[in-house]
Image (cartoon, rainbow, N blue to C red):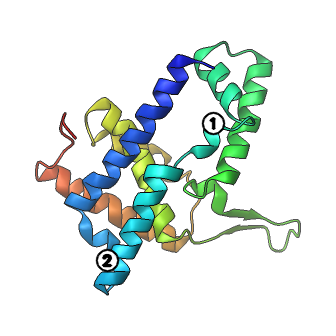
Amino acid sequence: MSEKYDEYLKMHRDNVYTAFIWLVINVPDIFDRGDQNDTNEFKALVEHQVRYEHDRSKWSEKEYDAYDSYFYGNRSSEVVNDFQRAWLHHIHMNPHHWQYWILNNDDPDEGEILIDMPDNYIIEMICDWMSFSIAKGDLNELFNWYKPRSKYIKISDYTRIRVDDILQRIKEEIDKGNNISEDE
């Protein structure tokens, strides 16, 4: 076990939660479900995901050592292969990754199907993306990361509309001066 990797995991999960809190404060309508009780339940669901469940599989036997070796060891071909298997496990265990929602069929007539992501996982995914910007101290980094990848990221039309809408709302808040602060 690597102390550096453990520190990274804690920081990442803390930053994902910080992103969630930032969204609650600055873009609260993304949690709106029409009814106040439904909205509160939905917000509590997303909070539970980002606070207690996010990336939990990274501590599993199938992921921990492979990630640790890849990021804090060497990048031998064996380490890279182990990491790729760990990453595949990770995206299949964590529905906040867009790759989780791609169905590759055996039947060539059906091909690849992009399944709509539920809103709670869309928000968790965006919190995950935001966490890296939080680590850099500037939420605008989110857009520097997303823009070149947006055409490559395979998501359904509904998911794309929802992601782009939430990102636009985040950008509007940042442009108003609601960037991440040191004490968040």
Residue pictured at 28% horizontal, 83% vertical? 36
131 horizontally vs 115: left or right:
left
Number of marks: 2
Label 1: how many Cα within 10 Å (few below 14, some 14–19, many 20+): few
Query: Who is closer to the viewer here, 44 or 164?
Result: 44
Quadrant of res 65 = top right
Residue 142 x/y as whole percent: 35, 44
Q: In the figure, 168 relative to 10: above or below?
A: below
| Amino acid type indicated by mark 1 | Trp
Q: Is residue 137 visible?
A: yes
Residue 71 x/y as whole percent: 59, 21
Residue pictured at 74% horizontal, 15% vertical? 76
Q: Is residue 147 visible?
A: no
**Label 2 secondary element:** loop
Residue pictured at 80% horizontal, 20% vertical? 78
Q: In the figure, 101 relative to 55: above or below?
A: below
| Amino acid type indicated by mark 2 | Asp
70 horizontally vs 38: left or right:
right
The residue that disc 1 covers is 59
Number of the label disc, if any, that sits on residue 166 = none
Q: In the figure, 125 relative to 157: above or below?
A: above
Quadrant of image for the C terminus:
top left
The residue that disc 2 covers is 32
